[in-house]
Amino acid sequence: MKTDYLGAGSTHREPMTNYYCTPGRVYHGTRWMFLYGRQTLIEQVGIRPGDRVLEIGCGTGENFENIQRLLAGSGELIGIDCRPPMLQKARERMRQSGWKNVRLIDVEYGKETITRGRTDVVLFSYSLSMIPDWRMALACARSELWTGGRIGVVDFCKPVNSSKWFADWLALNRVNINEPYEQELSRLFRKTWHLRYDAWAGLWSFYVLVGIRNASAVPATPFRPFGRAWFREASRAVIVCWAPRLIQALQRYRELPPQALVPSIVNDVRAFSHQQQQDDIT
């Protein structure tokens, strides 16, 4: 099956691809020793036949078989990753299994949504902690889901009384466990399942969190106006929400006669304001 390619000029794709092709082979070759909780995540997120499932950072497609078992050959499974070597292995897995409902997309996730609110389940399986702009990735993930759609995340977390060696080792492997992932997930989604586990006598820990997208608006994150956080949130809104619409509008304006240009702009502004109000509600 052909892989879709989205986006260009990624700043995260090249180092991740190079890493996987060199020292990352050791890391990925031993991931089975410490990547626990993936089966629990898939069971708890409630995948049903006919669902559209979006896995962010699908890698080689290790989770595909368990997801397909619940889809029962129906629905759609979309695998997202920005590392071509891993997508190639996922493609080989698809070919060997004969899956016809799987689509792979080569993109650095978080710049825009893939399904625009038409997804039932979004999964991050030990991938959220490897995404530099993880907040934008979660914002996009929320926008992927219908109201009532589910998100499931399993990833490393920092134990309260742990030594630094494991966190430092993960950092060398491009995994950051020092960010408030669970707090942001709890802000964006209504939690239905959230547990932390210690592995190997507490040498490291991981969490499993499942949440639902509610119809209510997301609580605002407090930030100082015109401070660093303000500009970060404003940039995210422009990239995720406004830029695609602006590009489409500009393309349409070029084809309009001069006398129709101003009325068209006024109508677009009114429609955009109405849509923003609806987005705040849903």
Image (tube, rainbow, N blue to C red):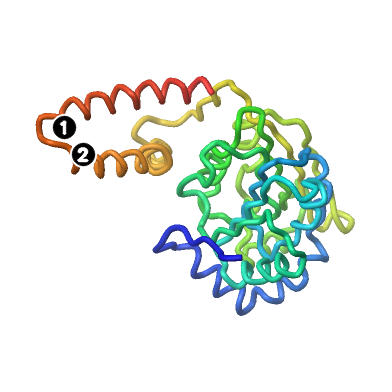
**Residue positioned 78% across, 49% down in the render:** 161
Residue of label 2: 253
Left or right, 109 with respect to 183, comes to left
Front in this rendered view, residue 212 or 105: 105
**Residue positioned 77% across, 65% down in the render:** 97
Identify residue type, mark 2: Tyr
Q: Around disc 1, counting alpha carbons within 10 Å, would you say few (fewer than 14), some (14 to 19), or many (20 or more)?
A: some
Q: Where in the figure is residue 76, as x and y percent of width and height?
A: 67, 48
Instruction: Using the image, determine if residue 7 lies above or below residue 118.
Output: below
Left or right, 141 with respect to 223, comes to right
Residue of label 1: 261
Identify residue type, mark 1: Leu
Contact? badges 1 and 2 (CB < 8 Å):
yes
What label does residue 131 carry, if any? none
Q: Which element type, helix, strand or loop, lies under badge 1?
A: helix
Left or right, 38 with respect to 113, comes to right
Instruction: Using the image, determine if residue 215 lies above or below residue 92.
Output: above
> Disc 1 versus disc 2: distance between alpha carbons?
6 Å
Instruction: Using the image, determine if residue 191 lies above or below residue 198.
Output: above
Front in this rendered view, residue 63 or 163: 63
Q: Where in the figure is residue 113, as x and y percent of width and height?
A: 50, 44
Front in this rendered view, residue 50 or 135: 50
Q: Where in the figure is residue 160, as x and y percent of width and height?
A: 75, 46
Instruction: Using the image, determine if residue 276 lies above or below residue 132.
Output: above
Q: Is residue 176 visible?
A: no
Task: State which quarter of the image contains the N terminus.
Answer: bottom right
Q: Around disc 2, counting alpha carbons within 10 Å, would you say few (fewer than 14), some (14 to 19), or many (20 or more)?
A: some
**Residue positioned 77% across, 37% down in the render:** 194
